[in-house]
Image: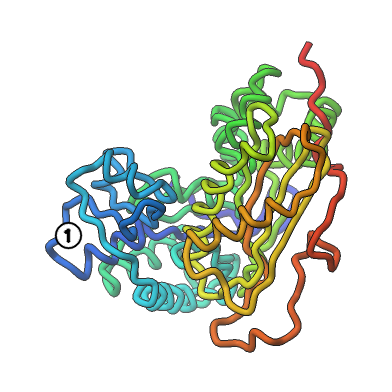
Amino acid sequence: MAVPDPDETDRGVRIRKIVHVDMDAFYASVEQRDDPKLRGRPVVVAWRGNRSVVCAASYEARRFGVRSAMPALRAERLCPDAVFVPPDFVRYRAVSRQTREIFLRYTDMIEPLSLDEAYLDVTENKAGLPTATKVAKAIRQAIREELNLTASAGVAPNKFLAKIASDWKKPDGLFVIQPDEVDAFLPPLPVERLPGVGKVTADRLASFGVRTVGDLRAMEIAATEGYFGRHGLRLRELAFGIDENPVEPDRPTKSISAEDTFERDISLEETEEAIRRMAEKVWAASRKEERIARTVVLKLKTAEFKILTRSLTQPEPPASCEELTEIALALRERVQMPLGQRYRLIGVGLHNFREPGSDPGGEATQPELFDGETETERLDEAEPPAPDAR
Protein backbone atom coordinates (compact mmCIF):
# COMPACT_ATOMS: atom_id res chain seq x y z
CA MET A 1 0.00 0.00 0.00
CA ALA A 2 2.93 2.34 -0.49
CA VAL A 3 1.55 3.57 -3.84
CA PRO A 4 1.91 7.36 -4.23
CA ASP A 5 -1.31 9.24 -3.51
CA PRO A 6 -3.18 10.15 -6.69
CA ASP A 7 -4.04 13.84 -6.96
CA GLU A 8 -7.16 13.27 -9.03
CA THR A 9 -9.83 10.66 -9.54
CA ASP A 10 -10.51 9.10 -12.93
CA ARG A 11 -13.07 11.83 -13.56
CA GLY A 12 -10.55 14.58 -12.96
CA VAL A 13 -12.03 15.66 -9.64
CA ARG A 14 -9.45 16.61 -7.05
CA ILE A 15 -9.70 14.44 -3.94
CA ARG A 16 -8.83 15.16 -0.36
CA LYS A 17 -5.87 13.66 1.45
CA ILE A 18 -6.85 13.11 5.08
CA VAL A 19 -4.69 11.84 7.92
CA HIS A 20 -6.17 10.71 11.23
CA VAL A 21 -3.60 10.65 14.04
CA ASP A 22 -4.44 8.78 17.24
CA MET A 23 -2.01 8.69 20.15
CA ASP A 24 -1.56 5.18 21.55
CA ALA A 25 -3.05 4.69 25.06
CA PHE A 26 -2.32 8.39 25.51
CA TYR A 27 -2.80 9.06 29.25
CA ALA A 28 -1.26 5.75 30.28
CA SER A 29 1.64 6.20 27.84
CA VAL A 30 2.43 9.64 29.25
CA GLU A 31 2.47 8.14 32.75
CA GLN A 32 4.78 5.32 31.65
CA ARG A 33 7.05 7.75 29.84
CA ASP A 34 7.41 10.02 32.86
CA ASP A 35 7.79 7.25 35.45
CA PRO A 36 10.23 4.51 34.41
CA LYS A 37 8.88 2.21 37.17
CA LEU A 38 5.60 1.97 35.26
CA ARG A 39 7.08 0.82 31.96
CA GLY A 40 6.06 -2.67 30.96
CA ARG A 41 3.49 -2.85 33.76
CA PRO A 42 -0.33 -2.78 33.46
CA VAL A 43 -1.26 0.84 34.16
CA VAL A 44 -4.80 2.05 34.73
CA VAL A 45 -5.39 5.81 34.79
CA ALA A 46 -8.29 6.28 37.19
CA TRP A 47 -9.20 7.55 40.61
CA ARG A 48 -9.90 4.80 43.09
CA GLY A 49 -13.45 4.65 44.36
CA ASN A 50 -16.75 2.85 44.04
CA ARG A 51 -17.95 5.14 41.24
CA SER A 52 -14.68 5.89 39.50
CA VAL A 53 -14.26 4.94 35.85
CA VAL A 54 -11.16 4.15 33.82
CA CYS A 55 -9.81 7.13 31.89
CA ALA A 56 -7.17 5.08 30.07
CA ALA A 57 -5.41 1.72 30.20
CA SER A 58 -1.96 0.74 28.99
CA TYR A 59 -1.71 -2.05 26.45
CA GLU A 60 -0.37 -4.30 29.20
CA ALA A 61 -3.66 -3.74 31.08
CA ARG A 62 -5.77 -4.12 27.97
CA ARG A 63 -4.59 -7.71 27.61
CA PHE A 64 -6.68 -8.42 30.72
CA GLY A 65 -9.78 -6.81 29.20
CA VAL A 66 -9.44 -3.42 30.87
CA ARG A 67 -10.94 -0.62 28.75
CA SER A 68 -11.66 3.10 28.98
CA ALA A 69 -14.98 4.10 30.62
CA MET A 70 -15.07 0.79 32.49
CA PRO A 71 -15.85 1.00 36.22
CA ALA A 72 -12.55 1.09 38.10
CA LEU A 73 -13.71 -1.69 40.44
CA ARG A 74 -14.24 -4.01 37.48
CA ALA A 75 -10.81 -3.12 36.09
CA GLU A 76 -9.27 -4.03 39.43
CA ARG A 77 -11.03 -7.39 39.38
CA LEU A 78 -9.86 -8.11 35.83
CA CYS A 79 -6.28 -7.08 36.54
CA PRO A 80 -5.44 -7.30 40.26
CA ASP A 81 -1.79 -6.42 39.60
CA ALA A 82 -2.62 -3.20 37.77
CA VAL A 83 -1.02 0.03 38.96
CA PHE A 84 -3.70 2.69 39.42
CA VAL A 85 -2.54 6.23 38.69
CA PRO A 86 -4.77 9.28 39.26
CA PRO A 87 -5.16 11.32 36.05
CA ASP A 88 -3.18 14.51 35.58
CA PHE A 89 -5.06 16.43 32.89
CA VAL A 90 -2.85 19.50 33.13
CA ARG A 91 0.09 17.38 32.03
CA TYR A 92 -1.92 15.58 29.34
CA ARG A 93 -3.09 18.89 27.88
CA ALA A 94 0.49 20.14 27.77
CA VAL A 95 1.57 17.06 25.79
CA SER A 96 -1.47 17.45 23.53
CA ARG A 97 -0.36 21.00 22.72
CA GLN A 98 3.07 19.66 21.80
CA THR A 99 1.55 17.19 19.35
CA ARG A 100 -0.49 20.01 17.82
CA GLU A 101 2.70 22.02 17.30
CA ILE A 102 4.06 19.08 15.32
CA PHE A 103 0.87 18.92 13.22
CA LEU A 104 1.13 22.65 12.46
CA ARG A 105 4.47 22.10 10.71
CA TYR A 106 2.54 20.31 7.97
CA THR A 107 -0.93 21.89 7.83
CA ASP A 108 -3.21 24.44 9.45
CA MET A 109 -6.21 22.26 8.60
CA ILE A 110 -6.43 20.44 11.94
CA GLU A 111 -9.65 19.23 13.58
CA PRO A 112 -8.99 17.95 17.11
CA LEU A 113 -11.41 15.28 18.31
CA SER A 114 -9.95 15.16 21.83
CA LEU A 115 -6.58 15.59 23.50
CA ASP A 116 -5.25 12.45 21.85
CA GLU A 117 -6.57 12.41 18.28
CA ALA A 118 -7.14 14.73 15.35
CA TYR A 119 -7.96 14.87 11.65
CA LEU A 120 -5.52 16.64 9.35
CA ASP A 121 -6.26 17.72 5.80
CA VAL A 122 -2.90 17.49 4.00
CA THR A 123 -4.20 17.84 0.45
CA GLU A 124 -1.68 20.68 0.45
CA ASN A 125 1.08 20.45 3.05
CA LYS A 126 3.55 23.06 4.26
CA ALA A 127 6.54 20.75 4.02
CA GLY A 128 6.04 20.12 0.32
CA LEU A 129 6.02 16.34 0.79
CA PRO A 130 4.70 14.52 -2.30
CA THR A 131 2.19 12.25 -0.56
CA ALA A 132 -0.07 12.13 2.50
CA THR A 133 1.64 8.89 3.47
CA LYS A 134 4.98 10.67 3.77
CA VAL A 135 3.34 13.38 5.88
CA ALA A 136 1.92 10.76 8.24
CA LYS A 137 5.31 9.04 8.52
CA ALA A 138 7.02 12.35 9.28
CA ILE A 139 4.49 13.24 11.99
CA ARG A 140 4.78 9.83 13.66
CA GLN A 141 8.57 10.04 13.60
CA ALA A 142 8.54 13.52 15.16
CA ILE A 143 6.18 12.37 17.92
CA ARG A 144 8.46 9.42 18.67
CA GLU A 145 11.71 11.42 18.65
CA GLU A 146 10.54 14.62 20.34
CA LEU A 147 7.86 13.39 22.75
CA ASN A 148 9.03 9.81 23.31
CA LEU A 149 5.50 8.59 22.58
CA THR A 150 3.92 6.59 19.77
CA ALA A 151 0.97 7.40 17.55
CA SER A 152 -0.98 5.43 14.99
CA ALA A 153 -2.12 7.06 11.78
CA GLY A 154 -4.57 6.37 8.99
CA VAL A 155 -4.40 7.90 5.51
CA ALA A 156 -7.43 7.98 3.23
CA PRO A 157 -9.47 10.20 0.90
CA ASN A 158 -11.97 11.15 3.65
CA LYS A 159 -12.37 11.36 7.44
CA PHE A 160 -14.45 8.23 7.90
CA LEU A 161 -11.95 5.99 6.11
CA ALA A 162 -8.93 7.68 7.74
CA LYS A 163 -10.32 6.94 11.20
CA ILE A 164 -10.87 3.27 10.33
CA ALA A 165 -7.34 3.12 8.91
CA SER A 166 -5.70 4.58 12.04
CA ASP A 167 -7.16 1.77 14.12
CA TRP A 168 -6.11 -0.93 11.67
CA LYS A 169 -2.54 -1.47 12.87
CA LYS A 170 -2.64 -0.11 16.41
CA PRO A 171 -0.48 0.42 18.34
CA ASP A 172 2.31 2.33 16.61
CA GLY A 173 0.98 1.60 13.13
CA LEU A 174 0.32 3.28 9.80
CA PHE A 175 -2.31 2.12 7.33
CA VAL A 176 -3.22 3.67 3.98
CA ILE A 177 -6.47 3.28 2.04
CA GLN A 178 -6.03 4.47 -1.52
CA PRO A 179 -9.12 5.74 -3.38
CA ASP A 180 -9.02 2.80 -5.81
CA GLU A 181 -8.85 0.32 -2.90
CA VAL A 182 -12.06 1.40 -1.15
CA ASP A 183 -14.34 -1.00 -3.03
CA ALA A 184 -12.15 -3.95 -2.10
CA PHE A 185 -11.43 -2.86 1.47
CA LEU A 186 -14.91 -2.06 2.81
CA PRO A 187 -17.26 -4.93 1.80
CA PRO A 188 -15.70 -7.69 4.00
CA LEU A 189 -15.82 -5.53 7.14
CA PRO A 190 -18.48 -6.23 9.79
CA VAL A 191 -21.15 -3.52 9.83
CA GLU A 192 -20.08 -2.65 13.40
CA ARG A 193 -17.07 -0.88 11.89
CA LEU A 194 -19.36 1.84 10.54
CA PRO A 195 -19.90 4.89 12.78
CA GLY A 196 -23.32 4.80 14.39
CA VAL A 197 -23.68 1.02 14.30
CA GLY A 198 -23.79 -0.21 17.88
CA LYS A 199 -25.07 -3.49 19.21
CA VAL A 200 -28.78 -2.65 18.80
CA THR A 201 -28.41 -1.42 15.20
CA ALA A 202 -26.12 -4.33 14.35
CA ASP A 203 -28.68 -6.81 15.73
CA ARG A 204 -31.42 -5.11 13.76
CA LEU A 205 -29.37 -5.23 10.57
CA ALA A 206 -28.59 -8.89 11.22
CA SER A 207 -32.32 -9.62 11.39
CA PHE A 208 -32.43 -8.50 7.73
CA GLY A 209 -29.42 -10.66 6.85
CA VAL A 210 -27.00 -7.72 6.88
CA ARG A 211 -23.79 -8.56 8.72
CA THR A 212 -21.07 -7.08 6.54
CA VAL A 213 -20.61 -3.77 4.76
CA GLY A 214 -21.02 -5.71 1.51
CA ASP A 215 -24.42 -6.95 2.68
CA LEU A 216 -25.43 -3.37 3.42
CA ARG A 217 -24.31 -2.29 -0.04
CA ALA A 218 -26.55 -4.97 -1.56
CA MET A 219 -29.60 -3.80 0.40
CA GLU A 220 -32.09 -1.85 -1.70
CA ILE A 221 -32.05 1.90 -1.13
CA ALA A 222 -35.79 2.01 -0.41
CA ALA A 223 -35.45 -0.75 2.18
CA THR A 224 -32.52 0.92 3.90
CA GLU A 225 -34.38 4.21 4.16
CA GLY A 226 -37.62 2.51 5.18
CA TYR A 227 -36.01 0.55 7.99
CA PHE A 228 -33.65 3.22 9.32
CA GLY A 229 -34.85 6.59 8.03
CA ARG A 230 -32.22 9.27 7.39
CA HIS A 231 -29.75 7.26 9.44
CA GLY A 232 -30.11 4.48 6.89
CA LEU A 233 -29.11 6.78 4.05
CA ARG A 234 -26.05 7.86 5.99
CA LEU A 235 -25.12 4.23 6.65
CA ARG A 236 -25.47 3.45 2.96
CA GLU A 237 -23.15 6.34 2.06
CA LEU A 238 -20.55 5.09 4.51
CA ALA A 239 -20.89 1.55 3.14
CA PHE A 240 -19.76 2.93 -0.22
CA GLY A 241 -16.96 4.96 1.38
CA ILE A 242 -18.71 8.30 0.86
CA ASP A 243 -18.01 11.00 3.44
CA GLU A 244 -18.06 14.61 2.28
CA ASN A 245 -17.52 16.12 5.74
CA PRO A 246 -14.52 18.46 5.57
CA VAL A 247 -11.85 18.87 8.22
CA GLU A 248 -13.02 21.78 10.38
CA PRO A 249 -10.09 23.52 12.12
CA ASP A 250 -10.60 24.55 15.74
CA ARG A 251 -14.24 23.53 15.83
CA PRO A 252 -15.26 24.01 19.47
CA THR A 253 -17.02 21.20 21.29
CA LYS A 254 -20.75 21.85 21.48
CA SER A 255 -21.77 18.81 23.45
CA ILE A 256 -20.72 15.40 24.72
CA SER A 257 -23.34 12.73 25.16
CA ALA A 258 -23.89 9.01 25.47
CA GLU A 259 -27.06 7.06 24.71
CA ASP A 260 -28.26 3.50 25.23
CA THR A 261 -31.13 1.86 23.37
CA PHE A 262 -32.59 -0.95 25.45
CA GLU A 263 -33.26 -4.42 24.09
CA ARG A 264 -36.73 -4.14 25.66
CA ASP A 265 -38.73 -1.10 26.69
CA ILE A 266 -38.41 -0.37 30.42
CA SER A 267 -40.10 1.77 33.06
CA LEU A 268 -38.72 5.08 34.32
CA GLU A 269 -37.77 3.48 37.63
CA GLU A 270 -35.64 0.90 35.79
CA THR A 271 -33.49 3.54 34.06
CA GLU A 272 -31.19 4.32 37.00
CA GLU A 273 -28.50 1.78 36.13
CA ALA A 274 -28.37 2.99 32.51
CA ILE A 275 -28.25 6.64 33.61
CA ARG A 276 -25.27 5.86 35.82
CA ARG A 277 -23.49 4.05 32.97
CA MET A 278 -24.11 6.89 30.52
CA ALA A 279 -22.99 9.51 33.05
CA GLU A 280 -19.74 7.60 33.57
CA LYS A 281 -19.07 7.50 29.83
CA VAL A 282 -19.82 11.21 29.41
CA TRP A 283 -17.67 12.13 32.39
CA ALA A 284 -14.72 10.08 31.06
CA ALA A 285 -15.05 11.71 27.61
CA SER A 286 -15.33 15.21 29.10
CA ARG A 287 -11.96 14.77 30.82
CA LYS A 288 -10.35 14.96 27.37
CA GLU A 289 -11.72 18.46 26.77
CA GLU A 290 -10.07 21.71 27.78
CA ARG A 291 -13.41 23.53 27.74
CA ILE A 292 -15.97 22.91 30.47
CA ALA A 293 -19.74 22.46 30.30
CA ARG A 294 -22.40 24.19 32.36
CA THR A 295 -25.52 22.32 31.23
CA VAL A 296 -26.44 18.74 32.07
CA VAL A 297 -29.03 17.09 29.84
CA LEU A 298 -31.17 14.01 30.31
CA LYS A 299 -32.82 12.54 27.22
CA LEU A 300 -35.47 9.83 27.08
CA LYS A 301 -37.25 8.26 24.15
CA THR A 302 -40.59 6.64 24.80
CA ALA A 303 -41.81 3.38 23.31
CA GLU A 304 -43.85 5.58 20.92
CA PHE A 305 -40.66 7.36 19.73
CA LYS A 306 -41.46 10.60 21.55
CA ILE A 307 -38.31 12.35 22.78
CA LEU A 308 -38.27 14.00 26.20
CA THR A 309 -35.41 16.20 27.41
CA ARG A 310 -34.72 17.81 30.76
CA SER A 311 -31.76 20.08 31.46
CA LEU A 312 -30.09 22.05 34.23
CA THR A 313 -27.68 24.95 33.74
CA GLN A 314 -25.50 25.96 36.68
CA PRO A 315 -22.84 28.66 37.21
CA GLU A 316 -20.21 25.95 37.68
CA PRO A 317 -19.83 22.59 35.91
CA PRO A 318 -20.25 19.27 37.72
CA ALA A 319 -17.12 18.68 39.79
CA SER A 320 -17.19 14.88 39.64
CA CYS A 321 -18.78 11.91 37.95
CA GLU A 322 -20.89 11.39 41.05
CA GLU A 323 -22.24 14.96 40.87
CA LEU A 324 -23.04 14.58 37.17
CA THR A 325 -24.86 11.33 37.91
CA GLU A 326 -26.87 12.84 40.75
CA ILE A 327 -27.94 15.78 38.55
CA ALA A 328 -29.05 13.40 35.78
CA LEU A 329 -31.04 11.34 38.27
CA ALA A 330 -32.62 14.50 39.69
CA LEU A 331 -33.64 15.52 36.16
CA ARG A 332 -35.38 12.17 35.83
CA GLU A 333 -37.65 13.20 38.69
CA ARG A 334 -38.91 16.08 36.52
CA VAL A 335 -40.31 13.68 33.93
CA GLN A 336 -44.07 13.78 34.35
CA MET A 337 -45.49 10.92 32.34
CA PRO A 338 -48.19 8.29 33.02
CA LEU A 339 -47.11 5.63 35.50
CA GLY A 340 -47.17 2.84 32.91
CA GLN A 341 -45.09 4.70 30.32
CA ARG A 342 -42.22 2.64 28.87
CA TYR A 343 -38.94 3.91 27.45
CA ARG A 344 -36.69 2.56 24.72
CA LEU A 345 -33.67 4.89 25.05
CA ILE A 346 -31.85 6.92 27.69
CA GLY A 347 -29.15 9.53 27.17
CA VAL A 348 -26.99 11.80 29.32
CA GLY A 349 -25.17 14.81 27.93
CA LEU A 350 -23.06 17.85 28.73
CA HIS A 351 -23.78 21.04 26.77
CA ASN A 352 -23.04 24.76 26.86
CA PHE A 353 -19.25 24.43 26.81
CA ARG A 354 -17.11 27.46 27.62
CA GLU A 355 -13.47 28.27 28.25
CA PRO A 356 -12.20 27.73 31.81
CA GLY A 357 -12.23 31.01 33.71
CA SER A 358 -14.72 32.72 31.39
CA ASP A 359 -17.58 34.65 32.94
CA PRO A 360 -20.18 32.12 34.08
CA GLY A 361 -22.68 34.90 34.65
CA GLY A 362 -22.94 35.73 30.99
CA GLU A 363 -25.84 34.77 28.81
CA ALA A 364 -26.07 30.99 28.59
CA THR A 365 -26.44 29.31 25.24
CA GLN A 366 -29.12 26.65 25.34
CA PRO A 367 -28.41 23.30 23.71
CA GLU A 368 -29.59 23.27 20.10
CA LEU A 369 -32.00 20.45 20.84
CA PHE A 370 -34.08 22.54 23.22
CA ASP A 371 -35.27 25.45 21.06
CA GLY A 372 -34.65 27.76 24.00
CA GLU A 373 -36.50 25.65 26.59
CA THR A 374 -35.13 23.69 29.52
CA GLU A 375 -37.90 21.12 29.20
CA THR A 376 -39.00 19.90 25.80
CA GLU A 377 -40.95 17.13 24.22
CA ARG A 378 -40.95 16.22 20.54
CA LEU A 379 -41.59 13.32 18.24
CA ASP A 380 -38.51 11.69 16.77
CA GLU A 381 -38.79 11.72 12.99
CA ALA A 382 -35.36 10.27 12.37
CA GLU A 383 -36.05 6.79 13.67
CA PRO A 384 -39.39 5.27 12.65
CA PRO A 385 -40.76 2.22 14.40
CA ALA A 386 -39.12 -0.99 13.23
CA PRO A 387 -41.32 -2.93 10.80
CA ASP A 388 -42.12 -6.56 11.38
CA ALA A 389 -39.28 -8.68 10.03
CA ARG A 390 -40.73 -10.99 7.42
Q: Residue at x 70, y 18 (%)?
A: 208
Residue lying farthest to the top in this orientation: 390
Amino acid under label 1?
Leu
Which quadrant of the figure has residue 364? bottom right
Q: Nearer the viewer, residue 59 or 55?
A: 55
Q: Residue at x 86, y 28 (%)?
A: 222
**Can residue 216 be seen from the camera position used here?**
yes
Which quadrant of the figure has residue 28? bottom left
Q: Position of residue 16 (x, y in %)?
A: 64, 59
Count of numbered circles in the view: 1
Q: Would residue 106 appear left or right of 346 to someone viewing this image?
A: left
Residue lying farthest to the left in this orientation: 37
Q: Position of residue 162 (x, y in %)?
A: 54, 52
Tell me the residue that label 1 is attached to.
Answer: 38
Q: Residue at x 78, y 11 (%)?
A: 390
Q: Residues within 10 Å of mark 1 (few under 14, many from 20)?
A: some
Q: Would residue 149 appear left or right of 195 to someone viewing this image?
A: left
Instruction: Report the quarter where the N terminus lies.
Output: top left
Q: Would residue 352 appear left or right of 23 to someone viewing this image?
A: right
Q: Position of residue 80 (x, y in %)?
A: 20, 43
Q: Nearer the viewer, residue 362 or 88?
A: 362
